[in-house]
Image (cartoon, rainbow, N blue to C red):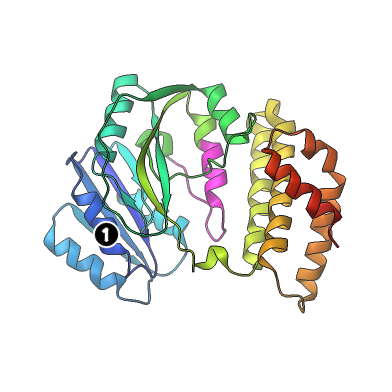
Amino acid sequence: MPEISVIVPIYKAEHYLNRCVKSVLEQTYQNFELILVDDGSPDNSPILCDKWAEKDNRVQVIHKENGGASSARNEGLKIARGDWIVFVDSDDWLNKVALKTLYDLVKKYNVPMAIGGMRVVQEYTDTQIEAKEDAVVLSHADLMSRFFRLNGESDTHRVWGSIIQRNILGGYTFIEGKMNEDVEACYYLARKCEAAIYSDMPLYNYFKNIEGVTNSEFSKKKLDLLDIWDIVQKQVEQYTPEYGYVCEMNCKRARFTLLTQMNLNGYDHHDPFMIETKKKLKREVQGAFWKLMKWKMPVSRKMILVLDCILP
C-alpha cells in the first residue's frame, strides 16, 4: 500500500506533462502512487498519461469530462490510497527530495501537514537541492495568521507543494467551477490543522508561463475571487468568528487586487458589464482606502493603492 498519493490534474498539458511526471517518478522517496487525472484534455495529454501508466505500475490514470482542476482533484481523492496527499500541477515539477523532505517533516514533528517552499521559474531547469534541517513549526494561530496575511505575508493560498494527512481531507470537496478555489481550501486546512511545519527549501518549481492566460487581458472569470471570499466569509462567521474583521479586510484586499489587475492588464472597454464592474470596484476600494492603508502591506502595494484610487 502506498504511503503517499500524488494527484496531478491535467488539461492541455502535453508540452509540460512529461517533465512533471518524470520529476515525481524520480523522487528519492519511492513509496507512493501517482494519480494522473485527465480532465477531458483535447490535446495529446490523455495518450501521454496512458503511456506513463504502461511504463510504471505506480501510475494510475483517470479519464473524465472537463470540469476544472478542482473537479480533477476531487476525482483523484476518491481513489487515493495513501495516508498522505500531495497535489502537483501538470506544468510544474518537484525537486528530487521533495516527497522525502515533506514526509520526514510530518513524521518527525507529528503534524498533519508540511508546507514546502517553492521557486517561480519561467523555463525548465533540473537544478536540485540538498535536503537540510530548516523548518518552523506553525501553531493553529500561526496558520490562521498566515492565511489572513496578518503580518504582511506574501500570498500563501496554494495547496500544491504541501503534504497533507488524508484524514484531514476526509469529507472535504474542492469548490468546482471557480478560479482561486485554493483560497477556500487553504482556509479549511488552516482551520482544521492544530499545527503544521513549514520549510523554506524550494521543493516545488512553479512554472510561470509569461505568455499564458495569467498575463492576458482581465477576464470575467477572475471575478470568481470575490465569490470565493464570500464563501470563506460565511465559513468564518460559522467556525472562527474571532477572525471576522481580518476576513473582511481580506475581502476588501481582494477587490483592490482585482482593480489593480484591471488597470494593469486592461479589459474589454466595449463590454458594459466590465465597465460597470470597474466602476464598482473603484468605489469599493476608495471607500476602504484608509483601512487598507493601515493594513500590513508592502509600501509598493500601498503606492499602487493610491494610484488605483486617483487614476481616472
Q: Does the stretch in magenta take in 174?
A: yes
Q: Is residue 147 above or below residue 6?
A: above
Depth check: 305 or 250 in front?
A: 305
Q: Is residue 38 left or right of residue 228?
A: left
> Which image quarter is the N terminus in?
top left
Q: Is residue 280 visible?
A: yes
Pinpoint residue 176: horizontal percent, then vertical percent.
Answer: 52, 57
Q: Residue drawn 71% across and 63% down?
A: 262
Which residue in the structure is indicated by mark 1?
19
Depth check: 93 or 163 in front?
A: 93
Pinpoint residue 291: horizontal percent, then vertical percent.
Answer: 81, 36
Give, as a single range, the part of the protein colored magenta.
171-188
Q: Is residue 1 visible?
A: no
Q: Residue drawn 13% across and 64% down?
A: 54
Pinpoint residue 248: horizontal percent, then vertical percent.
Answer: 74, 38
Q: Residue drawn 18% across and 40% down?
A: 28
Residue density around tag 1, few if under 14, some if 14–19, many if 20 or more, within 10 Å: some
Q: Secondary structure at mark 1?
A: helix
Depth check: 199 or 113 in front?
A: 199
Q: Is residue 207 left or right of residue 103?
A: right
Q: Amino acid at mark 1?
A: Arg
Q: Is residue 187 above or below residue 287?
A: above
> Which image quarter is the C terminus in?
bottom right
Q: Is residue 57 above or below residue 137?
A: below
Pinpoint residue 169: horizontal percent, then vertical percent.
Answer: 42, 39
